Image: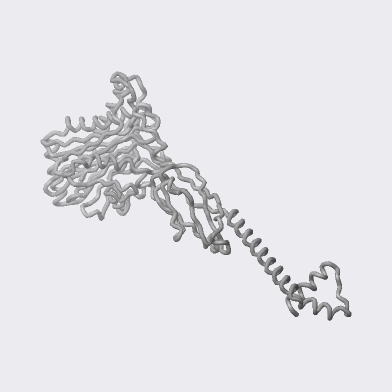
Amino acid sequence: MSETKVYIQNLLLLNNIKIGLDRETLFEKYVDEAFNVEAVKLIKEKQKTMMDKWVLKNRIEDVLTKQIIIPNATIGKPYQATLDFDQLELNDVAYVALDSLDQYGLNFNSDLKLIEGTPSQSGDFKVKMKFKVLGEDENSEPNVKMISLVINADPKSLWKNIASDDQKDDHWKAQNYWKPDQVNDFQPLGDKHIVVSSKRGRSHANVGSFREDDYAFKHFEDNGWSIVCVADGAGSAKLARQGSKIACKAVIDYFAQNLTEADLASFDEILLHHHQVGGDDKQISHFVYNNLSKAALYAHKQIEAFAAKAECPIKDFHSTLIFTLLKKFKFGYAILTFGVGDCPIGLLNKDLTEIKLMNWLDVGEFGGGTRFITMPEIFSSEKFSTRFGFTLTDDFSYLMLMTDGIYDAKFVVEANLEKVEKWKSFIDDLKGNNEEKVAVDFDSSNQKIAHQLSVWMDFWSPGNHDDRTLAIIF
């Protein structure tokens, strides 16, 4: 049965017209008329065109209503995002373009369906996606779909940097125990060198408050010993900046006044015996405890006296304190340490295969609460004697003292301080293996090293915006 006959029969039936037996011959002739054959052919073509157009319009509408989400970008950071048309079930999209991305510092590779570039402005934007699906006329205007593009502001730019002495005179500075918002230094330290930087955290800079951390160091040419101190003033203590400063200065002053020739000569003999014979020498423990405990107590007493004179409670000066006393002998380096609080001292051997944590941290056991040199109870605690460390080593690559502004961001948890791979990653970070590609060149002839360390310490770490102090002996 011909297509024409079937179509006309169905048309007549739709209009309740029946073909009698006596008219079948007439109907056959009617069907074969050229006009009817052509008319049915034309109608069928028009119907197919209408159907195709409807399917096409539906498909375009599917694409227009399809949710297309692209990852958020961040201003100033290289960005790449691919429109995965397979995953989006848009394989029949024959042409696609994104308009005006260049005004945001981006461009679109239509072959790779790739958005890339470095965003130049932040905000929530609507981008025109022009597209055609298979079946559309090549000369027709493309369809337009709006997709969202979110470019986040650089988190760093949201933080203010208000100087703690903004428009303040010398009298105000003296009254408020002001000290610079950031300091750094690089000096020889015996046959080693020390580079150190201390800077105010973003949380303090954002409101114009003070740097609470502090440090001090000194090499005694006459006896060969060196002392390095680092202190972290408690953020909850309103005069912590002064407490940390007094603590560091007091330790230096104590050893300047009390490293007597007689004591040092006898200790040299003890160390030589320890090197030659080995074993657990109680005389070493006695020297370490006797000298370092007195220095720690002296720091406490100095803060206590200052607090009394200022008519303030000593808790207003709460500060952690760590320090190391070291000397080069013919047979190696003697390193003595003390620590109270949550600031670590790490010693890395020459080939970076071993890490020795020279103090334990006041975390965990106290439910996250640290201890301070200003607390008299630490001196009467049965654990006081465990706050001292000693080691004798042929040589070392780095001896580091840091506050929790560094430790929290780079080591995260205390357990990582015992892992040499974490320290190696930390050193790699210092040498430039970081997102900002900021490097510190540990060459004793590098006169820019202190500045490099200071710049490195501006690293971004979400949630870690405390003061940062890092002293490195190398």
Residue 452, quarter of the rendered image? top left
Which residue corresponds to the image point at 80% horizontal and 79% vertical from the top-left?
A: 29
Residue that appears at 38% across and 45% down: 76
Snapshot colouring: one colour
Report the number of numbered marks. Answer: 0
State left or right for residue 160 relative to residue 333. right
Q: Nearer the viewer, residue 392 or 92?
A: 92
What x and y, as percent, mark residue 93?
Answer: 54, 61
Residue 327: percent from the left, percent from the top? 16, 42
Q: Nearer the viewer, residue 429 or 300?
A: 429
Residue 38 visible in the shown view:
yes
Q: Is residue 139 left or right of residue 468?
A: right
Which residue is the extreme one toward the front? Answer: 34
Residue pictured at 44% horizontal, 60% vertical? 112
369 versus 246 height, above or below: below
Question: Is residue 376 at least partly visible in the picture?
Answer: no
Q: Position of residue 429 (x, y in %)?
A: 30, 49
Looking at the image, is 330 positioned above or below residue 162? Answer: below
Decide: is 453 above or below 41.
above
Measured as percent of width and height from the top left, residue 374 is found at: 33, 30
Question: Which image quarter is the N terminus in?
Answer: bottom right
The image quarter containing residue 173 is: top left
In the depicted view, which residue is nearer to us: 206 or 352?
Answer: 206
